[in-house]
Image: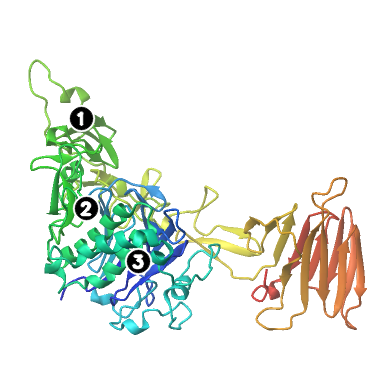
Amino acid sequence: MCPFAGECLVTGQSHFKTFDNKFFTFSGHCQYLLARDCTDHHFSVIIETVQCADEQDAVCTRSVTLSLPPLEGMTVKLKHGGVVSVNNMDIQTPLNHGNLRVQKTVQSGARVLFGDNLRLDWDGRGRVLLKLGPVWAGHTCGLCGNYNGNQGDDFLSAAGLVEAGPQAFGQSWRINGDCDSTHRQDTDPCSLNPKRVRFADEACGMMMSEVFGACHFLVNPLPFLRFCRYDVCVCSDGEKCLCSALASYAAACSSRGVLLTWRTPELCAMHCPVGQLYKTCGSVCEQSCRSLSGVEPGCGEEEGCEEGCFCPPGHYLSETGVCVTPDLCSCLHDGQLYQPNDIYADHNSICYCENGSMSCSSTEISGVMLSDLFFQDDQPPSRERRAATCVPPLRRVGCEGGEEGLECSRTCQNLDLPCLSLACIPGCLCPNGTVRHRRECITPEQCPCYHNNRAYAPGQSINMDCNTCMCENRRWRCTEHVCDGVCRTVGEGHYITFDGLQYSFPGLCQYVLVQDQCGGDEGSFRVLVENEACGVAGHRCAKAVTVYYQGGLITMEHGQVRMKKPVMKGVEVEIIRSGQFFILLLGKHISISWDLGTRLLVHISSQYRVILLL
């Protein structure tokens, strides 16, 4: 069986093909869950869509992000133009980190592989192809469907119901709640742009011609024809969108083993940069100078076939996008780029860049000098690799057999963090089972705990709110008492929640600040706030507070606190003036402090922690 049995495609103006081959168009502007392992949560794929033309329905994919909880929540983001970032930091490719492999493909494309059952292809311009192995069958959710072989339930929403149309289905997988969730009617853009209909019909009709005929039996052209017509009608540059649509169908054919020669000098000609050659099917491996610095991730297995511009044989693509011979290639070493013949030295090694690869020799205490690398008395430099001796208990790592070197040296502080090894650095490491702490190798159990950059020895404790935390096995073990909470308002529209979240909301109405009337329960109290006289010349901006408590009504406004409706019999309420504050005590568990202005503090005891709505 093919290792990638399921394919989900995003192409053109937000057209989708699910794992179970259901085709639909969804024109939402937001971040959406494309696919996720909804059983064990091993991966999530999120796409970001934006308006990409004057027409509102012209929506394209700007970026795609792969989240990998098994790799401690690592995220790989593929951006427009081919930029790749890992954990929000732009990186140089290729990258090989455990089961994760990232490499450049052609033009501005990138490919991500995770294990043997996930492959994500991105062309840098909006086309996304997610391939999953059969191990994920029946375990996915999102815009790509549930991968169970049944198209009938592909519109299963996040709420567990099958939606009737793509708009409601797409909005159910919206990630960002701040995005526009307007449900648009499914419309044909060709009916809104009648001047473009004739060109769309004639141009897209080529997909049904003999040029593509060899593929019709393997890949149904009708959904792609419908997408092509839609894109050409909605695009201001119809010819550009036509070429993108035809290329999308040709790529689907290529993945099934049918290579099509459909481009001509008059139709969608691909103009390659000077020195590069166009190929309908070229390998993405061993094409760049980076490939000379080490084995490329994903190569040597199923290399794949891509349409695009490639360097001629014996040449490699440099960082500047020019095809050069190996002696002009730069070198990738320890995440840094070095130009040909550059020399790099530190306290561990001396390296030089030659034919795209960094050659290193060790610096021993016995006296390796930088001058060894230069010609002296017409003698060639000595470039033999020396075997460094490590002071016990340190052990020597020579970067052989794919092992990690000094770049992954473990200390007490980074022991639980992932290592992104861009290149192995030889040197001396602590023995297995120990980590480096200052100048010693110790067991992880001897490691201190850190807080605010301060080290605490095992057994030491600190106080965090109402809990006590003790250092144990390099981790803080804390008591789990439920602490009281405080919510604050500051100024005209700034808030700090019980959980410490700070945000601004300059609303003009009355709003619920906090209440325990949640989930249909009647509740015992409710606090409402609104701004009063803010922005009015000659008046002081202040909060007007309305408190409902145990049948009573209390107002805090105009510099006064008044009981407008009494509470139930036996309920304790107390109003105290303390300095510049009025303090309202509601029983033994709630207090509200007001400075007669915009500052308000609501202090709630721990018993309300799980039932409050803020």
Quarter of image, res 271: top left
Pick the quarter of the image with the N terminus. Answer: bottom left
Sort mark 3 into few (<14), some (14-19) or many (20+) by Cα contacts within 10 Å. many
SS class, disc 2: loop
Specify whether residue 65 is in view.
no
Q: Earlier in the sequence, mark 2 or mark 3?
A: 3
Q: CA distance from mark 1 to mark 3?
A: 65 Å
Residue at image coords 72%, 69%:
514
Sort mark 2 into few (<14), some (14-19) or many (20+) by Cα contacts within 10 Å. few
- Observer-nearest residue: 265 or 572? 265
How is the model colour-coded? Answer: rainbow
Sort mark 1 into few (<14), some (14-19) or many (20+) by Cα contacts within 10 Å. few
Specify whether residue 367 is in view.
yes
Relative to 328, residue 235 above or below: below
Instruction: Provide residue 112's location: percent of width, then percent of height.
Output: 28, 58
Q: Earlier in the sequence, mark 1 or mark 2?
A: 1
Q: Amino acid at mark 2?
A: Glu
Pick the quarter of the image with the C terminus. Answer: bottom right
Residue at image coords 14%, 69%:
215
Badge nearest the viewer, 1 or 3: 3
Residue at image coords 25%, 40%:
333
Circle 3 is placed at which residue position? Answer: 15
Circle 1 is placed at which residue position? Answer: 366
Residue at image coords 29%, 33%:
347
Task: Give the residue at the far top of this rendering.
Answer: 377
- Observer-nearest residue: 322 or 518? 322
Q: CA distance from mark 2 to mark 3?
A: 43 Å
Circle 2 is placed at which residue position? Answer: 403
SS class, disc 1: loop
Relative to 213, residue 331 above or below: above
Relative to 148, residue 448 above or below: above
